[in-house]
Structure formats: C-alpha cells, structure tokens
C-alpha cells in the first residue's frame, strides 16, 4: 500500500546547433555521470547529471543545459543506427547503416573505426558486465564479440526457411529485431519475424555458446519492444490486440519461453507501446504509450499479483519522448524529447495510508479506498473506489474535525475534489465505484508537482508551465507563452452542491487561484503545519526549510525563513505536534536518501532508517512515539521525549542489533520477520497497531508491546478502567499492569470505580485470578514503561489507606474488590462465585471464610428458603466445586476440618474425590469424641498447636500429661502454657521443662534464667558453668550456701578453665578475689599483658618481690615486640613490591588484549569473534572464565561452588593466581594494629617508663610507629593503584606515601597509643 510520489522534477533545455536538428539517440556514463545525445546532424552533445542539481538551474525562463558537442564524420549516404557507451573503453560505440563500427573518444574528440559489418549495423547491445557486445546485422545475423573486437560466434535470428529474402535496411530492421540481456549477462533474448510481419517469435540464447535455449510460440507482438527484467524473472513484451478490439497488453515470459502473465495498458485499441524499460531494482516498469494527440510515459508496479499504474506523465506527440532509468538510482528517470528538453524525475515511495488509517491506493485513474481501522483488507482488495476522468498523478488528504476530504491532480492537468462521509458509515459503500468530476476553474492549473491542504477550503500547490510535459500545453484556453516556470499557488475551493451526510460529494467543486508566487528555488516537499491551519513548511533542494503563511492569516501568502533546515535534502518529510496538551509545538522530521532520519534542531535520530511513522494515543493527535524501521529489518518504538532529551544512544543502542549471542534483557526492538517489509500505517489510540507490508504485497498488522502498554497506561491515567481491561485481555498483557502502574494502594482506592466500569463478573473473576504480589511494571515491563503515573497516584491516595493491609498487595486488592462487588452488584450466583474467587486467591487463601459462606448457603438450602431468595445465590454444591477448582482440594478439606464442621468436611471430601475409605473412619472417630478432644485432634492434624493446647487444656486435669507432651514436642508453646496454667504446682514443671529444652539447644544463659525462676539452683549452676560465666556460678553458689572450702575449690576450677580458654585477665580476678593467690594473680595479669594492673596489685599487697618479676617480663615483652615490628616492616615492603609487580603486569596484559580486541572488532566472522573471546579469558591475571558457545556448560551450582572455593582461598597468596593481587592487598590490611594491641602497647610503654627503661620504651615506640605508618601507607598506595589503569613508578612508592600518612594521621585515634615524651625525639 504505497504510492509513487514525484518529489523532484528538473526540466532543462539543451540548445541544438540548428532549428531542424533533433535528438535521435542517448547514452549514459554511470562512472562520471555524463549524458550523451546524438542528433540527426551527427552531433554528439555531452552534459553532466550534476547540472540538474545546481541551484536555480531552471529558475529563469531561458534555462538551458550546459553542454559540450562534437561531430562524427560519416559518408553522406551513411546514418547512425545504434549508439551506446562502452565503459571498458571509456568511449561511445556507434553503428551505421553501412556497417561501420565506430569508437568515439569524447575526451579526445577522436573517432576510430573498429570494424565493418556486411549488411549494415541495425542494433548494438552491450551485456550488463560490458564484456560482450552483440551486433545485429542487416542480414539477420547476430555477431557476438568481446570488447576487444574478437568474434566469439555468429548466429542467425531467422529460421532457415525464413532467412531468404529478409534483408531489411538498417533503420527498420533494428525495430523488428531487438536484443535484451538478462541482468547477470548469462542469457539474451531476441525477437524476430516469422514468415510475415504479422507475427513474431521470442527466442532466448545462451551467451557463452550461442545455443538457442528456448523460444516462444508465434504471437502477434506489437512492435520491437523487448525488455528483460534485471533480476531475470520476467521478459516483457507487447501484444497487439486490435483483432480482439482491445488495447495493447504488456505480456511477460519466463526464461523457458512460456507466457507467464499480462495486463492491458488501459488505452484505446489504436494505442501503441513504443518503449518498455525496467528500473535497476526490477520493481518498476516504465513505458511510452502513444495515445491520440499525446504520448504518455507510464510507470507500473507489481504487487500481490496485480499490476498498478502508479504514475503517468504526458508529452506532446510531436516530441516523441524517450527515456532511460538511472542504472544506480532505481527511482530516477531521465526523459528527453526530439526538441532537446531533458527532464530528470526523482520519485519516492510514500505510504498510501493516511493519518486516520485510511489507505488510498493509486491505480491508474482509480483511487482504491480501504479503511484499515475497520478491516485489514489485503491489496489489491479495497472497500470502494473513486473513478477519475484521467490518470491520477498525486493527491492530498485532509482529515480533521470529522472532515475527510481528498484532492487529486490528474495527468491531464485537472484537479478533482471529493468530500467523504464519516468513516463509521463507510461499510455501506462496500464494492461501489464513484465517478469524480473535475473541479471547474477559470485558470489553467498547470502540472501540479506538490499539493497539500491548508484548511478544509484551501489548497497549496507547486506547479509548472511552459515545458513540453506541462499540462498547460494541452489546454486550448491558455495563450502560448503566457507562463513558464514553477509557481506556488493558493487554491480556494467552494462546492456549489449541498453536502449530504453519509454520501460522497464528487462534483460541483469550483477552484480559484487566490495567490500566486514565482519560485526561484526547487521545492521538493510541502507539509502542512498541524499547529496552524494557515501555514505550511516547504523544503527546498538543499534541505532548507521555509514556512509559508497563507493570505488568510497574517502573512498574506508569503515565505518566511523561520526553521533550521535539514543537513541534506529529505524526500520524506513530515510535521507533527510534539509536547503535552496545550503546550504542543510542531516538529519536522525528514528522511534523506541514504537513510538518515533528521529532526528539528539539527538532530540526526538514526543513520540507518528505511522508513518511519508516528503514533499518538491522545485525542488532540499530539505524537508520543516515533516508529522506525531500519535497513537491518529492526522495528524500533521511540519515545519522542527521548529524542530531545539526548537519550537515544543509551536506550536504543544506535538502532543496531546487539552483537551478543545471548539475548539482551533490555532488547527494545522487534525483528521484522520478512526482509524488506515496510511500515505503511499506524492505528492510533487504543488500537496501538503498526501495519507492515512485505515485499510480496500482503499486509501484516502487529501490536508492539510498548505501544500496547502506552495505550493501556493512557486509559488508566484517564480512569478508563474498562477500556484498559479490554486491551489487557485482547493483547494477553499481565492484568497486574492495571494495579501496578499507579501503585496497588491507589488502585485499592479506585476498586469501586473499576468494578462499576467493567460491570462484567466474568471479566472481574478473570482479573481476580491474575492478581499476584509481583510488581510487573518494575520487572516484566521495566523496559517498556518508564514513567510512573505519579499524579494519578497522588490524587487517588489523598483519601488514605487506613482500610487496607499495609504490606499485602494481593489481600488488600482482593478485599477492596470484594467490598466493591458487594456494594455494586445485587445478589446473584455470579456475584457470589466472584466473591469466593477473591477469598480463594488471597495470600494466604481465606478458605475458612469461603467455606463459611458456603455453609450459610447450605443452611439456607436446608431451611427451604423461598424461591425468590433461592435464585440470588448458587447452590452449595456449585459454590463448593467452584472453590475446589480455584484452590487445592487438600487445602479446602483441611480448612473445612478447621471449622470443626464434620458434615461440611464430608461434603468437601466427596466433591474433592477423596477415597471414602480414608476419610470416613477418621470423621466417624472424631464424631464419637467429646468436643474438646475432637477439636484437639483436628488441631493436631492441621498442626495448629496453639489451638490444640488451648483445647486440650480446657478438657480437664486428666489431660495434663498430654499438655506436657504437646508442649515438649512443640517448644514454641512454652509461653502459652505459662499463660494457661497459673497454678504454681502446674506451672513449675513447664518452667523446668523449658529450661531443659534450652539447655539441650545450648542456650545456657536463658536456661539458667528459667531454672532460677523455678528455683532449680543445681541446674542453673550447671548452665552457668557450661558457658564459663564465673560470676553467675559463684553467685548461684552463694544461693546454695556452699562452704568456704567448696567455694575455694570451685573458684580454683573456674580459674583453671578460664586460663585454658585464653582469658588470663578474668582468671586473675578469681585468683585474687576468691583464692587470695597473689603470685598466680600477678602472673596471670602478666600473661594478659595488663602491666599497669599487675603493678597496682603488687603494690596493693606490698609484694616488693614481685616487682622485679613484672619488670623483667615487661622488658622481655618489649624486646619481643620490637623484633616483631621490625620483621613486620620488612614484610610490608616485600608484599607491596610483589603487589606492584603483579599489578603492572596485569595492566600491560590488559592493554595488549584491548588492542587486539580493537583490531578484531571489524571482523564480522563469528569464528573470529569467538576465538577472541576465548583468548581473552586465558590469562592468569584476569578474573574472567573461559567460555564459548560449545564449552559454557557449567551449571549455576558449579559456578557458585567455584566462587565459594575462591572466597575461602582468598587469604592464601598463590603466586600467579588470578586473585594474587587481591590476596596481597587483603594481607596488607590484615597486618594493621588492632585496638587491643594498641591498648596493650600503651600499657607496656607506661610500665617501662615506671621502671626507668626509657630507652627500651623509646625504641619500642619508634619501631611500632614505623611499622604502623608503613602498613597504613602500603594499604593506601594499593587502594589508589587498584582503581587506576596506570602505575607511576616514581609517585607510587612507599617512600612517597609514608610522610603523607604521617602528616595526616599525626593526631588520629590510630596513633593515640604513643607516649608524647618520645614524640619530640622523632
């Protein structure tokens, strides 16, 4: 569904040397973009295609094409019969009627005779690769030779019985025997007469051997028209169908000579097809058809087994127009006339689908109308058709404010206007064809190139006059020479007929030119301004944009430079409204011919775009998303705001496919399943669809997830819950989107409105069954929905959430829905089932509440309620089956048991299809029990131990032992048992049992407390001893009134235990306070390195004999520590040097790998990239693992186990391992002085000072300080280098870092252990 739009048309006149001179032949040099023309006087004119792109090349009335010319000298009786450009020789190849083969060097202006052919040269055809030349002679022979003029072979076009007498002069024979090559040059086709001039035969020849491959049947071919499609699929020719009283038909043959298909050219029986040519991409077939008093250049397009006439350009018959396709640009057509006018046409494909999703497909003199919003009709089908008096060249559509108007300009210069009814009434027009009359005008409108609507009664057009293909030359009312050039016009429209609602208005339109401006620059596109009905944007050939202000507005029909243009000419241009409602502004988008998508402000959105469209979910048609397809067949949905916020690269990855073999989690594009498919239209609003057309022509409608979610969210923001729910169901979106977008708390407040709008219990039940605790906006759809509905949430939450559970999304939502169901719907079976669904789907399921409702229904049934009430609720059996369908049968059975209703339980068991042999004996046994015992046994079965304890406790004192057994098996019941049994005689056993349980669980501290509360001192003493709580043990011993010897013995045992456990300080307290052993106490304090306390105890007990012991021990300890710090200082230097070496080696290897990776990044071969990725994991100095598509079979469990082993081994330094540098850093950090060590060190320094060992203390402090500063400096150096990619061997040294650390840490807590008296000596 696309139309061929002519966006650039440049006609220039080539001045001939004489008035009676005409053009006869043309050729094109692709490499240097040169055009060659041979005139009837044997002049060769040369011009460059660039001349047609020069600014203002045609702006004046005397515009002409700059050329160089040279003459070819021939004998007076000799004429040129063939003319082509031989690229291999960079010269023109000419054939003459006398048989000369001439090579003309244009640059040197030299003619060379390269051969002479008997019978004359009638046709020369070059193979597509230029390696072979085929020459048709006047004797019907085909000479096939190389470009070096070596003859390969010679074949005869005529059969043996027809060859005699068929020598025709060169000028006529060429037309009777054309040659056409297949695109790859392997075969060529010829057409020759058979017996008489009335029938011809198509023959296919093999290039290499010259063998006849196939031939067609004798047919009435109309003239020497033969064209082989470059792709090789079809060979085009023309049938003469005058005998059938039909116009000529274009017929297609296969390589085997069989006819494949055909279509009529759609003109009279006297029409004649003079030429046919394919474009280089084989999708367009152009032909010149002679029709009455004019010649028509027609362009056909094939899609879905139908040939569409997409464009027609009329020329005067005496001009004898001829044309050629540009062999590099498939949509550029070059036409020339006998009189020397050369016109270059540039076409583009435009979608036939309008902004309101209506397809208007041009096909000759018809426009086929298909409303895609009503039905996706595959072409060539359509709903109804508009028939015009001539071929349609282009059109403009106006669809605003419920108006649908169409303006079409025709190949005869007419302008037609149609007003269509509302789309909702179009179904009544199905299958009809409406004839459209041309509008009446007093002034000839010329040939219209561009046409747009400014408002419902005003058109803006660009048209031209005075050229050989201008429609004004066909109008007798125009005075010759009155206008020439291109003009910009405003056309006012008025309908003289009454417009009837529901009917088409196809006649009675009057067109008046109200404003006219001469154009001095080439206009390649016009787009109306959606923000104003009085202006439009015009694009010129260099990409410059000007705004046109209508005479109706304030501009008076003038052009004003207002907008920054595009950096290149963009044949595809559109203007859309962007922004929020009330603050929207127009933004221009343009797509150039190399695939760059431009936007206003000099923004290049995409560099590989193939086509684009827009989507709007708002009523005011403000565009919210850009939809673009790339040349790699990827479909992107782009938020408009991302374009102007500069987030394109981060969100859309430069619009290319990820090279990762693993699918990216944030993949935000759609793979177009068929190569070359294009976007043809978009369904806006809630439909949220994108329509694609494949190269075969069929339509496919897709619903991009992002657009669907946007439409759903838009409906939610507008509180259209029913529309949102219907879209969720239709597109299989998670129902939780409705809840999570604004937050489940906000939705809970809107539950009643949701239920009221949906008003369908089936839909609500489906919704309830889908509610889950996961926030799908943050998980499942996080890449599609980024903006939360904060405004809606804030407004909704204003009412508070006091009625809903704070943290349980599912239960809160279902409770709100349940309440809304009860308030909105009257009692009915469906409502009751829906309420049961909300109970069953809660988290946790409220099965008991559901069974209570079923129990009420059952009681109503048993009470024989009136029939009217009976119709308002379902049967108990139906309700129960519904509940069993929603929940697990065992869970429902247990819930029924929990109600202690054995009859209901039996009914549930039967409907859950449980085996009666299993549940009936159990229920019967329960029925025979007293109520408390029955409840106790049920609670035990359901593991409701608290209820079981309450019930068995209420059963009487005879079940006290059962209570104790239950509590011991379920220790969590101990607190409840103490509440139930307040009698001390019954309470104490529970306390003692609780203490025993805690002792068994090694919770001795709590167990001792429990034992004390029940006065079990012996067990409390054991519990305290178990955790070496010596103060608790000795306290309980006091309560036990132990004797002095027993306490002394107990204290001795505790002292030994604490000493064995490495707690000499606490053991010293016991020895001094309970045992009275000063010697042991002091020795234990020395072991604890509590020097000051040891001295205090010595002097307190006046034991001068122990002073020397403390002194000797402190001096020895100082010596030991000094040696340790000196050794530690050496280790710090050693570990740091190793770390720097390992780090430097890793950085060098990483730089090498990165360089190799950059060198290999341009290699597209998968094997090369895989080898590179494997090599990057082989280093011992990288934490990566070696993986490839063939070897990455390790499970997640294996990976976790490997990581755990690596973590355990982190403390070990293994040279050459991947973790070596991290292990070195960890080891350096582990060498720091702990808080306890600093406290002991300070105590030792003070003691040494007391003993007069100042020098020993100074040496110890100096060595300890040096070690600590070196360790801290080494750690800081490692931390600085581990995050950098470079290491400075002069700056990153311990000598540079140590002074810095010394200055920074001078007064820090870490160095507070130092004695200040020694600081001055540093």
Image: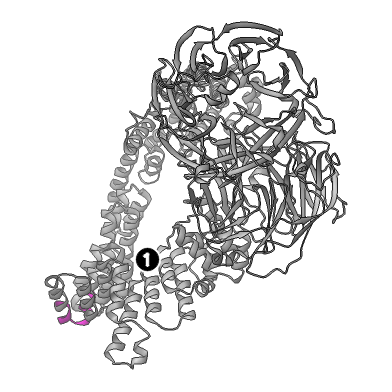
Within the image, what quadrant is residue 315 found in?
A: top right
Q: Residue at x 63, y 26 (%)?
A: 1317
Q: Residue at x 56, y 27 (%)?
A: 1283
Residue nearest the observer in this picture, 492 or 926: 492
Q: Secondary structure at mark 1?
A: loop
Relative horizontal placement of residue 517, taking residue 1080 as reference (left or right): right
Relative horizontal placement of residue 246, taking residue 922 as reference (left or right): right
The span shown in magenta is 925-936
Query: Do we see residue 608 in this rendering?
Result: no
Q: Mark 1 = which residue?
A: 844
Residue nearest the observer in this picture, 582 or 277: 277
Q: Main secondary structure of the magenta part?
A: helix
Q: Is residue 1245 above or below residue 208?
A: below
Does 1243 appear in magenta? no
Relative horizontal placement of residue 229, taking residue 462 as reference (left or right): left
Q: Residue at x 67, y 18 (%)?
A: 32
Disc 1 packing (10 Å; few <14; some 14–19; many ≥20): few
Where's the C terminus, which quadrant? top right
Q: Is residue 1322 above or below residue 605?
A: above
Within the image, what quadrant is residue 81 found in?
A: top right
- Residue 474, image x, y percentages: 75, 43
Does 927 appear in magenta? yes
- Residue 882, image x, y percentages: 31, 73
């Amino acid at each position: 569904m696309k139309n061929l739009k002519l966006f650039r048309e440049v006609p220039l006149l080539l001045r001939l040397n004489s008035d009676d001179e005409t053009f006869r032949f043309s050729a094109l040099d692709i490499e240097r973009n040169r055009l060659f023309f041979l005139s009837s006087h044997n002049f060769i004119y040369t011009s460059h295609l660039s001349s047609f792109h020069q600014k203002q090349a045609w702006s004046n009335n005397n515009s002409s094409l700059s050329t160089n010319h040279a003459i070819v000298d021939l004998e007076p009786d000799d004429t040129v019969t063939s003319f082509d450009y031989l690229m291999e020789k960079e010269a023109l190849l000419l054939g003459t009627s006398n048989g000369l083969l001439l090579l003309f060097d244009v640059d040197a202006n030299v003619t060379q005779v390269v051969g002479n052919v008997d019978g004359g040269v009638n046709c020369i055809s070059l193979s597509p690769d230029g390696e072979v030349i085929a020459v048709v002679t006047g004797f019907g022979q085909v000479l096939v030779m190389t470009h070096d003029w070596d003859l390969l072979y010679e074949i005869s076009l005529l059969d043996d019985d027809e060859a005699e007498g068929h020598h025709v002069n060169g000028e006529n024979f060429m037309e009777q025997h054309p040659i056409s090559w297949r695109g790859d040059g392997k075969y060529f086709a010829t057409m020759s007469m058979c017996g008489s001039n009335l029938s011809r035969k198509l023959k296919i020849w093999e290039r290499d051997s010259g063998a006849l491959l196939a031939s067609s049947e004798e047919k009435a071919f109309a003239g020497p028209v033969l064209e082989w499609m470059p792709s090789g699929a079809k060979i085009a020719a023309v049938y003469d169908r005058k005998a059938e009283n039909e116009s000529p038909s274009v017929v297609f043959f296969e390589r085997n000579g069989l006819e494949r298909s055909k279509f009529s050219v759609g003109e009279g029986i006297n029409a004649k097809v003079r030429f046919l040519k394919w474009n280089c991409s084989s999708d367009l077939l152009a032909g010149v058809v002679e029709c009455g008093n004019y010649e028509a250049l027609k362009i056909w397009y094939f899609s879905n087994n139908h040939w569409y006439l997409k464009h027609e350009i009329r020329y005067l018959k005496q001009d004898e127009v001829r044309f050629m396709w540009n062999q590099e640009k498939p949509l550029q057509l070059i036409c020339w006339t006998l009189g020397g006018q050369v016109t270059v046409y540039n076409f583009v494909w435009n979608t036939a689908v309008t902004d309101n999703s209506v397809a208007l497909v041009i096909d000759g003199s018809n426009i086929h109308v298909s409303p895609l919003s009503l039905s996706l009709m595959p072409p060539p089908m359509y709903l109804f058709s508009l028939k015009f008096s001539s071929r349609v060249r282009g059109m403009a559509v106006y669809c605003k404010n419920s108006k649908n108007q169409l303006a079409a300009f025709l190949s005869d210069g007419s302008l037609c206007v149609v007003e269509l009814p509302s789309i909702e009434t179009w179904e009544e027009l199905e299958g009809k064809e409406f004839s459209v009359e041309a509008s009446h005008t007093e002034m000839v409108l010329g040939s219209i190139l561009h046409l747009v609507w400014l408002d419902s009664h005003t058109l803006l057009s660009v048209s031209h006059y005075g050229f050989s293909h201008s429609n004004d030359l066909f109008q007798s009312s125009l005075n010759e020479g009155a206008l020439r050039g291109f003009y910009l016009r405003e056309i006012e429209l008025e309908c003289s007929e009454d417009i009837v609602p529901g009917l088409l208005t196809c006649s009675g339109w009057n067109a008046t030119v109200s404003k006219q401006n001469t154009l001095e620059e080439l206009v390649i596109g016009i787009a109306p301004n959606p923000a104003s009905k009085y202006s439009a944007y015009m694009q010129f050939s260099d990409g410059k944009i000007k705004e046109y202000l209508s005479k109706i507005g304030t501009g008076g029909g003038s052009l004003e430079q207002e907008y920054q243009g595009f950096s290149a000419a963009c044949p595809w241009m559109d203007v859309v409204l962007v922004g929020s409602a009330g603050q929207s502004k127009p933004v221009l988008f343009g797509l150039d011919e190399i695939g760059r998508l431009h936007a206003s402000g000099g923004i290049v959105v995409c560099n590989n775009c193939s086509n684009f469209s827009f989507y709007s979910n708002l009523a005011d048609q403000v565009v919210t998303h850009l939809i673009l397809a790339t040349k790699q067949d990827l479909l992107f949905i782009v938020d408009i705001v991302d374009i102007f916020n500069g987030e394109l690269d981060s969100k859309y990855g430069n619009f290319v496919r990820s090279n990762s073999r693993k699918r990216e989690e944030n993949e935000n594009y759609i793979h177009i399943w068929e190569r070359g498919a294009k976007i043809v239209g978009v369904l806006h609003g809630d439909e949220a669809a994108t329509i694609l057309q494949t190269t075969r022509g069929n339509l496919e409608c897709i619903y991009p997830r992002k657009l669907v979610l946007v439409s759903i969210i838009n409906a939610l923001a507008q509180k259209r819950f029913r529309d949102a729910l219907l879209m969720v169901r239709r597109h299989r979106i998670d129902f939780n989107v409705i809840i999570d977008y604004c937050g489940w708390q906000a939705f809970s407040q809107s539950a009643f409105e949701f239920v009221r709008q949906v008003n369908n219990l089936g839909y609500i039940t489906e919704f309830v069954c889908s509610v889950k605790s996961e926030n799908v906006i943050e998980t499942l759809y996080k890449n599609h929905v980024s903006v939360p509905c904060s405004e809606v949430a804030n407004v909704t939450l204003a009412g508070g959430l006091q009625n809903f559970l704070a943290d349980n999304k599912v239960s809160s939502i279902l409770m709100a829905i349940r309440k809304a169901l009860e308030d909105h719907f009257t009692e009915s079976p469906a409502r009751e089932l829906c309420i049961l669904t909300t109970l069953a789907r809660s988290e946790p399921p409220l099965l008991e509440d559901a069974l209570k409702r079923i129990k009420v229904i059952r009681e109503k049934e048993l009470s024989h309620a009136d029939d009217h009430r009976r119709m308002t609720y379902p049967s108990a059996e139906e309700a129960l089956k519904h509940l069993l369908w929603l929940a697990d049968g065992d869970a429902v059975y247990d819930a029924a048991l929990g109600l202690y209703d054995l009859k209901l339980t039996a009914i549930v068991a039967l409907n859950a299809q449980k085996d009666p042999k299993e549940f009936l004996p159990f229920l019967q046994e329960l029925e025979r029990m007293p109520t408390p015992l029955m409840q106790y046994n049920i609670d035990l079965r359901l593991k409701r131990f608290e209820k079981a304890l309450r019930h068995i406790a209420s059963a009487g004192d005879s079940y006290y032992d059962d209570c104790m057994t239950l509590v011991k098996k379920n220790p969590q019941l101990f607190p409840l048992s103490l509440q139930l049994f307040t009698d001390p005689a019954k309470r104490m056993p529970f306390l003692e049992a609780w203490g025993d349980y805690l002792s068994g669980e090694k919770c001795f501290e709590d167990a001792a407390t429990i034992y004390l509360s029940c006065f079990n001192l012996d067990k409390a003493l054991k519990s305290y001893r178990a955790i070496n709580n010596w103060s608790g043990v000795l306290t309980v011993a006091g309560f036990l009134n132990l004797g002095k010897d027993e306490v002394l013995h107990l204290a001795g045992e505790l002292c030994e235990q604490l000493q064995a456990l490495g707690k000499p300080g606490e053991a010293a307290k016991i020895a001094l306070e309970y045992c009275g052993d000063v010697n042991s106490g002091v020795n234990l304090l020395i072991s604890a390195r509590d020097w000051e306390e040891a001295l205090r105890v010595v002097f307190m007990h006046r034991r001068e004999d122990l002073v020397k012991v403390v002194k000797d021990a402190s001096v020895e300890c100082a010596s030991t520590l000094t040696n340790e710090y000196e050794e530690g200082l050496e280790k710090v230097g050693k570990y740091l040097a190793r770390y720097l070496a390992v780090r430097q080696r890793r950085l060098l290897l990483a730089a090498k790998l990165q360089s190799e990776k950059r060198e290999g990044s341009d290699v597209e071969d998968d094997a090369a990239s895989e080898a590179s990725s494997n090599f990057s994991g082989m280093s011992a100095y990288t934490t990566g693992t070696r993986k490839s598509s063939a070897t990455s079979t390790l499970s997640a469990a294996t990976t976790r186990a490997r990581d755990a082993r690596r973590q355990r081994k982190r403390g070990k330094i293994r040279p050459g391992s991947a973790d070596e540098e991290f292990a070195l850093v960890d080891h350096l950090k582990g060498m720091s002085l702990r808080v306890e060590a600093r406290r002991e060190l300070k105590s030792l320094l003070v003691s040494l000072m007391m003993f007069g060992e100042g020098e020993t203390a100074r040496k110890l402090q100096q060595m300890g300080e040096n070690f600590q500063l070196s360790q801290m400096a080494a750690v800081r150096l490692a931390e600085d280098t581990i995050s950098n990619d470079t290491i400075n061997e002069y700056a990153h040294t311990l000598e540079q870092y140590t002074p810095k650390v010394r200055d920074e840490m001078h007064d820090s807590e870490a160095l507070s252990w130092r004695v200040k008296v020694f600081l001055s000596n540093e």
